Amino acid sequence: MNKAYIAFDLGASSGRLMLGIEKGETVELEEVHRFPNDSVTIGGTMYWDIPRLFHEMKQGLKKVARRTDVDIQSIGIDTWGVDGAWIDENGQMINLPIHYRDGRTGKVIEEVEGLIDEEMLYTLTGIQKANFNTIYQIYYDKKYNKVIKEHGYKWLFMPDLLGYFFTGNLYNEATVASTSGLLDAQTRTFSEEIFNKLGFKREWMNELVMPGTKIGTLSQAIQEETGLGGLPVIAVASHDTASAVAGAKIEKENELYLVCGTWCLMGLEVGTPYLTKEAQEAGFTNEGSAKGKIRLLKNINGLWILQQLKKCLNDRGLPVDFPDIIAEAKESSHTYAIDIADERFMAPVNMEQEIVKACEEVYGIKLTTMGDIATAVYNGLGKLYKETVIQFEALIEESITTIHMVGGGTKDQHLCQVVSEMTGKTVIKGTTEASAMGNVLLQQGSC
């Protein structure tokens, strides 16, 4: 019977239970249960439906419990970062986790910056400013939510919260905590300076644990409900990007990873954070890695524009899919490239028309074929990735040799070729299921 590991991989639109099954020296991933992750708006506040997510996770465990062909070793959970919920003195969750797109924190940004300015925050944490960062969520909760102000005893990030539901144990996993804007990038601990300036209490947070730490076993109630035994629950690299990078199997500090999907994350694993004003202004952020290092990265545009182009083509009656678009793009040889980072491509009414219009304005040429229009996007992506690679090389003062591409974008061989040709780097194509694979590998190494 093959050993297997349960990887819960939750994203902003869906979650799934993936089974990582040992087959000799390799691990094969199998999707066992997939479920939607729909936000719920109540009274103008946008929440994550955590009861439904937990219910679906247990349904997945019930499916696994019926399997007779695998020997389950452990469970790991990875999710998105920054969000979480509060536990009271009695161990009860007292609020639904609020969605990072909710606008409530906008009213406290100036208040926080009046106590500690943006530049100092970056110097301490290495995290780029964003309204949804945990630092602003906690400040808002403790000032404006009376229930949390009085009874908010412990903060749990999303994967910590789900781990708590399964085991009853409180902890904060280091990679997801590193997204919060509350960790000192040098010491990798919660920043005393930030907590003191904002009036936060360290006891609101829990023990920081590193990826690979066993945080408990399934509670008796969960065992009885699902039919599984006392499986260990492992705190993997519970921020999904950290798990994805672990799944990319980076070996050297001068090898880039490109986690490629609707949006892309490009970065390096480095030994020390980059906290200079130049790094801040260039958009670099410093988060924790599965290896205890720093993931120096940039969030850049990915396949969003191509996805919207396909939608436009379908809306006007063309029954095309991505293979059709890719095949046409391969036949096009022009060098026109749109500016992928231009705000005009964030949410235009018609992406196809916007691409055509942009090329007409810049090059004086009107693109007419699907292949030519798509090529302007591919060229734009390649150009953006090349510029980002150059920024990384300037920052670390070292030549980059290799780009490890993982995620859904690796299904597009044409994109991989464009990245290689335009950056001049060797592209290694990894798994499309990078987060789940990294989740499993970290469990495998801890069992």
Image (cartoon, rainbow, N blue to C red):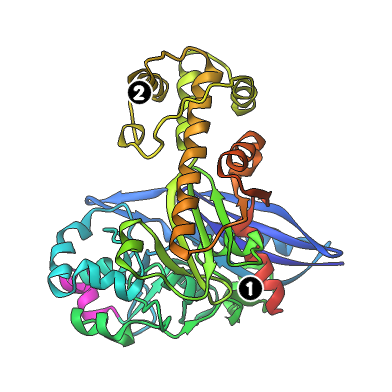
What is the crowding at mark 2: few (fewer than 14 residues within 10 Å), some, or many (at least 20)?
A: few
The percent position of residue 54, horizontal first and vertical second, equals 50, 62
x and y, in percent, of residue 76 in the image: 60, 69
- Pick the front one: 400 or 113: 400
Above or below residue 307? Residue 174 is: below
Secondary element type, mark 1: helix
Asked whether, in this view, residue 223 is left or right of residue 310, the answer is right
Q: Where is residue 2 in the image (x, y as percent from the top left)?
A: 84, 66
Q: Is the magenta stretch mostly helix, strand or loop?
A: helix
On screen, residue 187 versus residue 18, left or right, reads left
Disc nearer the start of the sequence (1/2): 1
Seen in the picture, residue 271 relative to 61 is either above or below; the reply is: below
Marks 1/2: CA distance?
64 Å
- In this orientation, which residue lies closer to the viewer: 38 or 213? 213
| 94 up-or-down from 329: above or below | below
The residue that label 1 is drawn on is 224
| Residue in the picture at 35% in, 56% down | 282
Identify the amino acid type marked 1.
Glu
Q: Name the residue under label 2.
A: 362
Residue 175 belongs to magenta span: no
**Residues drawn in magenta:** 140-152
Q: Is residue 411 left or right of residue 280?
A: right
Identified by mark 2, the residue type is: Val
Q: What element carries label 2?
A: helix
Q: Would residue 141 be counted in the magenta stretch? A: yes
Q: Which residue is drawn at 35% across and 70% down?
A: 275
**How crowded is the residue under tag 1: few (<14 C-alpha within 10 Å), some, or many (20+)?**
few
